Image (cartoon, coloured by chain):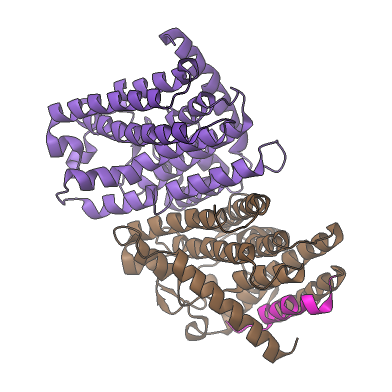
Chain colours: A brown, B purple
């Protein structure tokens, strides 16, 4: 898949995801809650996680217009969005800038931000369990189980708890890896696993290789994130640059230095590509997923 | 069902719910998160919502040891517990006492309280979607859909947003009813609906009557809550008494006076019993549900 084809693949899926999110995150929610939820979700995300769901679903044979994949893609993005809203709150990271805009609690107040995050999490699970648009109940239940586990104490929330406890602590690389594996990696892996659950024909071998791909990609994502925190500026990132270093948070760059972190990112990128080859799926079906993984590692924000 | 039989029915189910919650809310969650979650959930709740799920499930023919009902019961309690944790936080109600103990944010800090609430919500949906203990995937998907909707912006979170916006405002009885219908009633109704989803044989007529029962019970619960806020003391309630009045929150007592609120509670109790009769289900099967509804209206805390 050349760069032009991938851009066109992305545009189609991004448009569909944006339209679905705008429809499903309903302004009609009472007392300003709908506005806060929409503010947190619409106009601004890179939508990496939804694209990962779609690319994986297509890799295992789902059609480009799979409703199961679209719902899983949007549900995952809602979980990601809620985690950012809560993470930015004063009692957590106390951040005022996100995606180039004031954070939700700055714009709507802390109480509304807390509620908007809670309601976005609930909406994610609501999206996964439609009563009327043909997603098989087995796929619904499987995606809910994957997403709940990945976002809860076995996953993202657990990683955030470790992160909270680790500020100012010196972590080993293994501990740092474990924290990020939960905090960031679990949701990315979940995107791959939900995508795979949306397709008709996944062998056990392909699923194992896809799982390894998802794990390696999650780690690569975090290493690149740590690198960007020190090499990019706030305007490019759309969030406060240098904040991890300022908060004395453990990062790969702090642990191993910038050059070694960049070498690690390159190695992980190669590992991810190898895992895709190991799935045994057709090169054509894998093309969007391969291009997406490449984008994650090459990104500048 | 006489009082002795009901007490014995309750004891059996309470013991099972407590044991399941203690097993499923796992202390092994990292960096103190597990302790905060367990503190929020174990030892202290009346478990009204889990009992409502079990009583409804048995009314429609589920066995007393239904795993589907146990999972739905515990999931509902986790959603209730997370909502209390977040509600008590300084940016919301800023309460320091709950079930006779310091609130979660007082005990563990605000950041951990926020995460514990988030992780409890995720765990609720994880409990509903087991891969291995025989709950049909259709029941899993149905319960997730009901619980997600009831706890999100169509339900509890929406009601909380109205509540936030209504402090110091004068609401009509219709507006107050709508707020409580969402904030408190939606989860109680959901308990009835999930219970009904766990049983084998529910006619459309029975489901309609059960839904009406759940709605009326939710309203009765709130009216009694408002009455207790002014008539009981903190030691009996296990939480700060008089706080709604002190915060100038709209309540049924503030709106209509204490005597009229008590008459309304009595009327709603009668309506609830009538709705149960209208289900057409056998009196024997309905007995625990009838006794439970009676307890809700007669409670002193």
What x and y, as percent, mark residue A55? 69, 73
Up-down relation of residue B293 to residue B226 (above or below): above
Between B230 and A244, the one lying in front of the other is B230
Between B96 and B238, the one lying in front of the other is B238
In the image, is residue A257 part of the stretch drawn in magenta?
A: no
What x and y, as percent, mark residue B85? 41, 44
Quarter of the figure with the C terminus of chain A: bottom right
What x and y, as percent, mark residue B211? 41, 36
Count numbered badges in the picture.
Answer: 0
The answer, for residue A260, to whether it is visible in the render is no
Quarter of the view holding residue B254? top left
Between B104 and B266, the one lying in front of the other is B266
Quarter of the view holding residue B249? top left
Up-down relation of residue A60 to residue B274 (above or below): below
In this rendering, would B260 be left or right of A158? left
At x 45%, y 51%, the residue is B114
In this rendering, would A5 be left or right of A147? right
Please state the extent of the stretch shown in magenta in the rendering: A281-301
């Amino acid at each position: 898949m050349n760069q032009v084809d991938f851009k066109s693949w992305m545009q189609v899926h991004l448009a569909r995801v944006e339209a679905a999110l705008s429809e499903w995150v309903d302004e009609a929610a009472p007392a300003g809650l709908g506005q806060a939820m929409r503010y947190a979700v619409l106009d601004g995300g890179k939508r990496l996680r939804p694209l990962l769901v779609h690319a994986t679903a297509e890799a295992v044979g789902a059609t480009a217009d799979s409703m199961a994949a679209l719902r899983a893609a949007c549900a995952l993005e809602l979980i990601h969005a809620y985690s950012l809203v809560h993470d930015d709150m004063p009692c957590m990271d106390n951040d005022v800038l996100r995606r180039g805009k004031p954070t939700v609690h700055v714009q709507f107040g802390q109480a509304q931000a807390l509620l908007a995050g809670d309601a976005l999490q609930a909406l994610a699970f609501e999206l996964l369990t439609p009563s009327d648009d043909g997603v098989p109940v087995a796929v619904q239940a499987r995606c809910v189980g994957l997403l709940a586990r990945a976002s809860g104490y076995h996953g993202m929330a657990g990683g955030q708890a470790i992160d909270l406890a680790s500020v100012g602590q010196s972590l080993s690389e293994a501990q740092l890896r474990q924290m990020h594996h939960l905090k960031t990696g679990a949701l990315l892996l979940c995107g791959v696993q939900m995508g795979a659950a949306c397709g008709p024909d996944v062998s056990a071998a392909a699923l194992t290789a896809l799982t390894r791909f998802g794990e390696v990609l999650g780690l690569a994502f975090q290493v690149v994130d740590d690198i960007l925190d020190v090499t990019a500026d706030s305007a490019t990132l759309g969030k406060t640059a240098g904040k991890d270093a300022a908060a004395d948070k453990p990062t790969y760059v702090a642990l191993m230095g910038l050059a070694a972190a960049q070498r690690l990112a390159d190695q992980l990128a190669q590992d991810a590509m190898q895992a895709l080859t190991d799935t045994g799926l057709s090169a054509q079906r894998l093309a969007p997923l391969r291009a997406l993984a490449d984008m994650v590692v090459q990104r500048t924000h």
